[in-house]
Amino acid sequence: MFITPQSSVAGFITVDQEGALRQAQQLDEHIALEGSQALPPLAGIPLAIKDNLVTRGLRSTAGSRILSSFVPTYDATSVTRLKHNGAVVLGKTNCDEFGMGSSTENSAFHPTRNPWDLDRVPGGSSGGSAAAVAAGSCVAALGSDTGGSVRQPAHFCGVVGLKPSYGRVSRHGLVAYASSLDCVGPLAACVEDAALLLTAMAGPDPLDATSSSQPVQDYAAGLPPLASLGSRPLAGKKLALIRETLGPGLEPGVASAITEAARQLEALGAVVSEVSLPSLELGLPAYYVLATSEASSNLARYDGVRYGLHHPEAKELQALYAGTRDAGLGAEVKRRILMGTFALSAGYYDAVRTLIQREMASALLEHDALLCPTAPTTAYKLGEKVTDPLAMYKGDLCTVNINLAGLPALSLPASETFSSTLLVSST
């Protein structure tokens, strides 16, 4: 459904009109020669790609001035696989710089607006992708999720956001933020569309040693029609609300939406109980130390020497590094680099990560999936939190532990206010 003109939403950094028309023409020629029977599964489907996934011949900035003129010579593996399956790439969507942010206000180019209310943020860091899907500018889009960056904007914009298991989709060609946490995932209008994209992208990749060797399923085929399952399609399924996500700080609207979602799941036959994950509150500080520490290492490559922005007046190497990074990196990226450089204390936080993994694994031995809000609030006003980074960080409370555990999660719209339900599964 088309809600708001995309020019008002500002979901894209780069629109590739010529490239999209060329891809569509190639499909038309294929149909003329071979007929529609031989078409790949995503033939002609218009998709958008978050701008931290590199695209051959198409500017890829990761939302940063330091890469404002960077045009890659290759595609990210996820993009290659979508194109191989016939998808048409419309362009690159806006994002918080290097994926660091929760509102897309940290983009070096412009903020993106929520298509349901242009005075509100779309979430982040994949806010451009979520807004483009919600505005009807594309059928689906790719995002990346380090601590909730697919799921939280899906929640704010009322679309489906899927974070796959770590390694299920290759990270090759994803501009790194925190390599042990980063995942590529789809945003779509419905679960079936997200499943189709995951099927197309998933699988081992020799260019990514962390990609999973597990066989790829047809995820869409695993979604049986509800009509074939009767009035109680979830009969026999055991779900559990995560108690620690339902306490202080949860907006009343979000709380009522998650409660109503639980009731609806029970009406469909599921048994819904509660489970306690005492380590949940440890996840947020552990995540921000791990993520920023990895970021401080990953972003050292932006030095003004090999590619990207180059400080023209530097007379010696140290001045080149400092001048390039000062001009090319935004305030939030600098803040996270400094935090990571200061707080490199991996031993303790690796122990916290192991505790989180064990607690979630234990809970999932007894339940088919876990249930919690995607975020404690709904979409807030533009500018409301941009000067208060700690308030933004707290918004990741419900999502970061899933990245630390490497588990998959699905964010589903649960009401008209987009108080999404986050389902965590062991598979």
Image (cartoon, grey):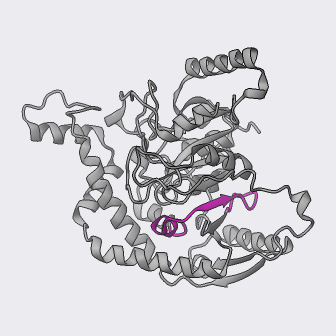
Nearest the viewer among 168 and 323 is 168
Q: In this view of the protein, which residue sits in the foreground, 317 or 11? A: 317
What x and y, as percent, mark residue 296? Answer: 27, 54
> Picture quarter containing residue 155?
bottom right
State yes or no: residue 345 in magenta.
no
Count of marks overlaid on the render: 0
Instruction: Using the rendered image of the protein, determine whether residue 8 is visible from the camera's viewpoint.
Output: no
Q: Quadrant of the C terminus?
A: bottom right
The quadrant the N terminus occupies is top right
Residue at x 60%, y 72% (from the top left corner): 250
Q: Position of residue 86 (x, y in %)?
A: 64, 30
> Nearest the camera: 407 or 256?
407
Could you tell me which residue is drawn at 33 percent across and 50 percent down? 333
Residue 364 position, x and y percent, is 61, 77
Tell me if residue 209 can be seen: yes
Residue at the far left: name it: 316
Magenta region: 397-420
Queried whether the magenta region covers residue 399, the answer comes back as yes
Task: Name above or below for residue 215 compared with residue 347.
Answer: above
Q: Quadrant of residue 253?
A: bottom right
Q: Quadrant of residue 317?
A: top left
Whether residue 237 sits left or right of residue 88 in the image: it is right
| Left or right placement of residue 248 versus residue 290 in this view | right
x 69%, y 53%: residue: 219
The image shows residue 239, relative to residue 300, as above or below, that is below
Whole-percent x and y of residue 48?
A: 58, 35
Q: Is residue 98 above or below residue 412?
A: above
